[in-house]
Image (cartoon, grey):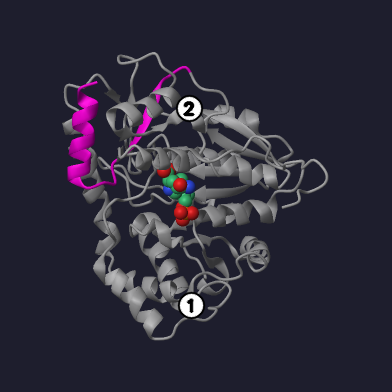
Amino acid sequence: MQTYPRPITSKLPNVGTTIFTIMSKLAADCNAINLSQGYPDFDCAPELRALFCHYINAGYNQYPPMAGIMGLREAIAEKMHALYGAQYDPEHEVTVTPGATYAIFTAVSAFVSPGDEVILFEPAYDCYGPAVEVNGGRAVYVQMRYPDYSIDWEEVRAAITPKTRMIILNSPNNPTASVFSGEDLRTLATLLRDTDIIIASDEVYEHLVYDGHKHQSVASIPGLAERSFVVNSFGKTYAVTGWKMGYALAPRNLMVEFRKVHQFNAFVSNSPVQYAFADYMKNKDAYLSLAAFYQRKRDFFLRGLDGSRFKPLPSRGTFFQNLAYDAISDERDTDLAIRLTREKGVASIPVSVFYREPPAHKVLRFCFAKSDETLARGAEILRKL
Ligand code: PMP
Ligand code: GLN
């Protein structure tokens, strides 16, 4: 094939293949236990699969409304009210999207113009920076403080300039497994009081919070809710990451702009699966039981590591357990993650890839959304290192 005649100027010159793709492929090639990419290795609920099949077979296979079917938008709004006391109008303030990544990208595209600054927290989940850059924005990073990955809000105050257009939040946080307190969010609300900064709050792990901690949604914080997109994913909650379905919530004046971008990009989200979720969301226990389910998995994995030279960092939320390995190796985490996959048969994610420059501390991230058998085998190998 002939090539494009002139040199190509990349809009994302520093972007390569994501670490998740790299490590999952390496795990498969090496037949290793895959504790790297964050997805369950067990199947979703049979009732949910049956509902999806039902709606396909019943002919719900054409374009749904642009913002999503009303039954699902109503179910989402009701859930937000029940859990966080938040009022979202399903007609104008709830939009169903093909995943949370898409919703974040759409919110950024709708509001960030060339030259605008967007504050991100480092380590940052991998899709945030590129979404800002491809829209011509500049990512400004505030460091989370190792080892508890807390945020110094005074640093956030110092990072705000007249060009700051948006802040992207993520709690429970991937990759650090930290969670915001109500105090964190109230402090942020105070900081933003006299600004027109918009928030995109990635809350995909809202139900995966442990040890009595409680998920704090920006939707319940006066001063934040009015300026925020709350973004969520059905993939995490219902163990269907491959279905790529999520949603965004925001006050009407913000959502109008979001939908302008959405309607010329995806335009709609998968139809039959929306009907399935609308029915399945009535089963509140399916999401309210998740914290106990995953906390047990986290503890099971940690028990398997008893006596190991790895040092577990706190995992207050998400389905990730970070392990510091200072006592085991001086290697870079990227090298160690590859070597452990190839030589020992366990794949993980090196946390330094979520930083622009590798930090001094050495940490690997392990996903515990796996069967007990997989976790036991993985922990047994790690314990001996
Ligand atoms: N945000 C975070 C923090 C995530 O960890 C993930 C996926 N693991 C996503 C967004 C992506 O969600 P989706 O697959 O619905 O795009
Ligand atoms: N969010 C998942 C993780 O952190 C991966 C999603 C992806 O592969 N983009 O592992």
Determine which residue is flagged by label 1: 70
Q: Please tell me which residue lies in front, 265 or 289.
A: 265
Q: Which mark is residue 140?
A: none
Amino acid marked by disc 1? Met
> Distance from label 1 to label 2 (Cα)?
42 Å
Q: Which residues are magenta?
A: 360-385
> Is 375 part of what is drawn in magenta?
yes
| Label 2: few (<14), some (14–19) or many (≥20) C-alpha neighbours in 10 Å | many
Query: What residue is at 45 percent from the left and 82 percent from the top?
Result: 60
Amino acid marked by disc 2? Ser
Query: What residue is at 57 percent from the left and 30 percent from the top?
Result: 142
Which of pointers 1 and 2 indicates the residue nearer the eye? 2
User: Secondary structure beneath disc 2?
Assistant: helix
Query: What residue is at 38 percent from the left and 70 percent from the top?
Result: 277
Can you tell which quarter of the image residue 211 is in? top left
Cβ–Cβ below 8 Å for labels 1 and 2?
no
Compared with residue 42, is residue 34 higher up or lower down, i.e. above or below? above
Sequence-wise, the earlier of marks 1 and 2 is 1
Determine which residue is flagged by label 2: 352
Q: Is residue 47 left or right of residue 237?
A: left
| Label 1: few (<14), some (14–19) or many (≥20) C-alpha neighbours in 10 Å | some
User: Secondary structure beneath disc 1?
Assistant: helix
Residue extending furthest front?
Answer: 1
Query: What residue is at 18 percent from the left and 38 percent from the top?
Result: 376
x and y, in percent, of residue 325 in the image: 33, 20
